[in-house]
Image: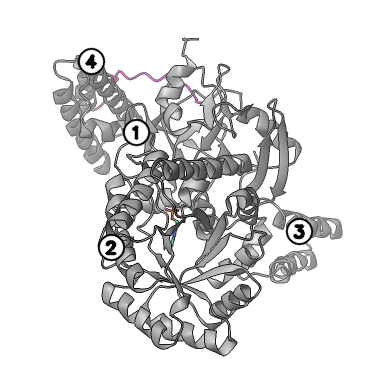
């Protein structure tokens, strides 16, 4: 076998960039996880998979590493701490996790537990998220931020939580929410902490460009802010107005966008703080991006800043403006979700086993076969570096002629088959030549993409990587084993839904973003593919295309010497589970089928035993996993 180093693999799949510090390739060609960071212990994902098999976990599955969540929280908080001491920032700095980023109970409860030492809290945007947040055990100083549009029940619940000592902040998204907040609070006789969401003119950039800025969906303009404060003053509730809030958007690619937003918000804070002493918090929202591509550039799916640069810029800018305006620094609240959750989970799937069927095929046309076929074959033979593009274009013409001839009934199936094969050989040869000469242009790239093998993977893009489908967001994809062997087949990945959109054909590979990814020649060994950095948003946006349901999920912990502990398991949906979501009850399903079986029995098509067998089989069938059992 041709030698291939794991360093080459790490560079090609770019795991040496996006994986740092949590994922890397070991000398044995397997991807390992290192949840405590660079200096911590590690374990092979392939070894983890064999442990999971013992627990009856199926593919695709989501493996969560809660210890990565713990490490991310530590990194984020210590970076803020270091920046605060570097710039003598005197306000408190505390975080909240935006529940919408991952509402899985296991994720929220791990974050609440690990976050106690940092007084970490939660941010919610709906009644259901508030219920989840209020059921968590938080440190006494932790805060709960209530965003989103609110009805009476939402506000009343927040007030009830305030009355039992939970630090809830109700954020007004619009000025017309203020009269209701005042009314509900007075009715209950409970004074809430109120925050005002600012509408900034700074634009976020990136995929979610439309979600912020002057015309964004949320927030109060300057005149609305002034009106809100006036209303609170008139209601004798100005002491409740404690926070200014903004959120620029998600996955902000360029640090300058943050700086602009923070500058603008700090200025508003400073000017308001001079008028209203009750305001003591500035909530800067989330938006810190993840370098999914691993190229450190201000492009979509990447970022051009580090965590430290972000925390430095935040605290320096706020501090600087407060000093200039001569007001005390605010307590800063941050709501970064993606930056906390993305790394902790991996979606693992198996490539459907397939063997390449190699048949000898004689490309040379036979005597008496149509003339164009001979011309096409000649093209294959005369193609060389000096003329390959010209010959390729000639061949495309001949191929069109062949198709016409077939439509007119002038081509046999054998001739058509030979034509397909010769044309394929010509295309491959052209790509080969172009690559060796470094002359791959857009046309050739499209051809290469069409030539790529389609590896079918046991998963649904719609359920497991919704942002890839909806926003063309890139996630790092990498085989989990055989990484000490050279991958030789350019491939795209198809999922098992019956939707042609259900495929992955954009990859982070080599020094670029490619339409295909080199994978390994299939053999008898199981071949696993992982989609990484999928812990933010993907879990909750997934849909049930083709009724493929939630995957099996499991928490895995890696101990000091690399021992693998399989923790809590959440089984994915069965056929019955997904059908129930879409309004079929078990009784309806079984009754409908059994009626037909009984009719067949009455008609003498099957005997009594067969009838019982068919009934039992149907029940067993409803309990199956929605994905393929390979
Ligand atoms: C979605 C959201 C966040 C989280 O954004 P990230 O990009 O995941 O950090 C924070 N605050 C608010 C108000 C949000 O809506």
Residue 378 image-quadrant placement: top left
The answer to whether mark 4 and mark 3 are in CB contact below 8 A is no
* Figure quarter occupied by ligand 1: bottom left
Mark 3 / mark 2, whichever is N-terminal: 2
- Disc 1 to disc 4, C-alpha distance: 41 Å
Which SS does the magenta portion mostly show?
Answer: loop
- Disc 1 to disc 2, C-alpha distance: 27 Å
547 or 37, nearer to the observer? 37
Residue under numbered circle 4? 381
The answer to whether mark 1 and mark 3 are in CB contact below 8 A is no
**Image quadrant occupied by the C terminus:** top right
- Disc 1 to disc 3, C-alpha distance: 51 Å
Q: Dot 3: within a 10 Å radius of its alpha carbon, few (fewer than 14), some, or many (20 or more) residues?
A: some
Q: Secondary structure at mark 2?
A: loop
Mark 1 / mark 3, whichever is N-terminal: 1
Q: How many marks?
A: 4
Q: Secondary structure at mark 1?
A: loop
The range drawn in magenta is 354-369
Q: Which mark is residue 295?
A: 1
Q: Nearer the viewer, mark 2 or mark 4?
A: 2
Residue under numbered circle 3? 619
Furthest residue in direction right, as rendered: 609
Name which residue lies at 72% across and 47% down: 568
Q: Is residue 282 above or below residue 389?
A: below
> Is residue 524 shown in magenta?
no
Ligand 1 closer than 8 Å to the CB at disc 2?
no
Mark 2 / mark 4, whichever is N-terminal: 2
Name which residue lies at 34% across and 64% down: 269
- Disc 3 to disc 2, C-alpha distance: 54 Å
């Amino acid at each position: 076998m041709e030698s291939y180093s794991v360093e080459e693999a790490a560079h090609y799949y770019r795991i040496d960039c996006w994986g740092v510090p949590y994922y890397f390739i070991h000398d044995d060609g397997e991807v390992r996880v290192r949840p405590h960071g660079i200096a911590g212990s590690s374990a092979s994902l392939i070894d983890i998979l064999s442990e999971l098999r013992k627990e009856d976990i199926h593919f695709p599955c989501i493996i969560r590493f809660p210890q990565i969540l713990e490490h991310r929280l530590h990194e984020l908080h210590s970076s803020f701490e270091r920046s605060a001491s570097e710039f003598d920032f005197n306000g408190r700095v505390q975080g909240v996790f935006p529940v919408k980023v991952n509402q899985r109970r296991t994720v929220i409860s791990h974050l609440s537990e690990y976050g106690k030492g940092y007084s970490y809290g939660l941010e919610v945007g709906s009644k259901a998220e508030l219920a989840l947040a209020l059921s968590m055990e938080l440190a006494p100083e932790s805060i709960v931020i209530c965003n989103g549009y609110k009805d009476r029940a939402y506000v009343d619940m927040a007030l009830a939580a305030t009355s039992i000592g939970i630090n809830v902040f109700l954020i007004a998204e619009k000025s017309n929410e203020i009269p209701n907040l005042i009314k509900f609070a007075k009715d209950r006789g409970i004074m809430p902490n109120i925050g005002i969401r600012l509408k900034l003119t700074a634009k976020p950039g990136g995929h979610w460009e439309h979600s912020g800025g002057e015309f964004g969906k949320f927030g109060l303009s300057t005149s609305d802010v002034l009106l809100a404060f006036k209303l609170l003053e008139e209601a004798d509730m100005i002491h409740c107005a404690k926070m200014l809030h903004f959120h620029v958007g998600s996955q902000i690619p360029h640090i300058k966008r943050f700086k602009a937003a923070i500058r603008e918000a700090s200025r508003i804070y400073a000017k308001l703080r001079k008028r209203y002493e009750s305001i003591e918090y500035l909530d800067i929202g989330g938006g810190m991006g993840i370098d999914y591509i691993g190229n450190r550039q201000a492009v979509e799916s990447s970022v051009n800043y580090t965590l430290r640069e972000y925390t430095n810029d935040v605290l320096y800018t706020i501090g600087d403006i407060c000093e200039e305006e001569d007001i005390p620094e605010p307590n800063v609240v941050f709501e970064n979700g993606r930056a906390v959750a993305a790394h902790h989970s991996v979606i693992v799937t198996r490539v459907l086993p397939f063997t390449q069927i190699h048949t000898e095929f004689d490309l040379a046309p036979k005597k008496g076969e149509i003339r164009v076929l001979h011309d096409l074959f000649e093209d294959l033979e005369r193609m060389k570096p000096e003329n390959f593009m010209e010959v390729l274009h000639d061949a495309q013409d001949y191929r069109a002629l062949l198709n016409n001839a077939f439509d007119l009934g002038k081509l046999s199936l054998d001739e058509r088959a030979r034509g397909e094969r010769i044309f394929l050989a010509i295309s491959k040869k052209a790509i080969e030549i172009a690559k060796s000469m470094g002359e791959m242009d857009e046309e050739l790239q499209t051809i290469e993409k069409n030539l790529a093998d389609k590896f079918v993977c046991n998963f649904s893009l719609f359920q497991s990587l919704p942002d890839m489908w909806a926003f063309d967001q890139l996630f790092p994809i990498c085989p989990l084993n055989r990484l000490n062997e050279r991958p030789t087949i350019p491939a795209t990945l198809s999922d098992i839904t019956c939707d042609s959109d259900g495929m992955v054909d954009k990859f982070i590979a080599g020094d670029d973003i490619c339409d295909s990814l080199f994978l390994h020649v299939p053999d008898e060994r199981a071949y696993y593919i992982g989609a990484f950095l999928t812990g933010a948003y993907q879990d909750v946006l997934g849909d049930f295309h083709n009724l493929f349901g939630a995957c099996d999920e499991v928490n895995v912990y890696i101990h000091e010497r690399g021992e693998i502990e399989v923790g809590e398991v959440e089984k994915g949906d069965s056929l019955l589970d997904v059908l129930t979501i879409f309004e079929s009850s078990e009784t309806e399903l079984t009754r409908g089928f059994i009626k037909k079986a009984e009719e067949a029995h009455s008609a003498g098509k099957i005997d009594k035993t067969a009838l019982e067998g068919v009934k039992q089989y149907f029940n067993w069938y409803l309990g199956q996993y929605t994905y393929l059992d390979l």
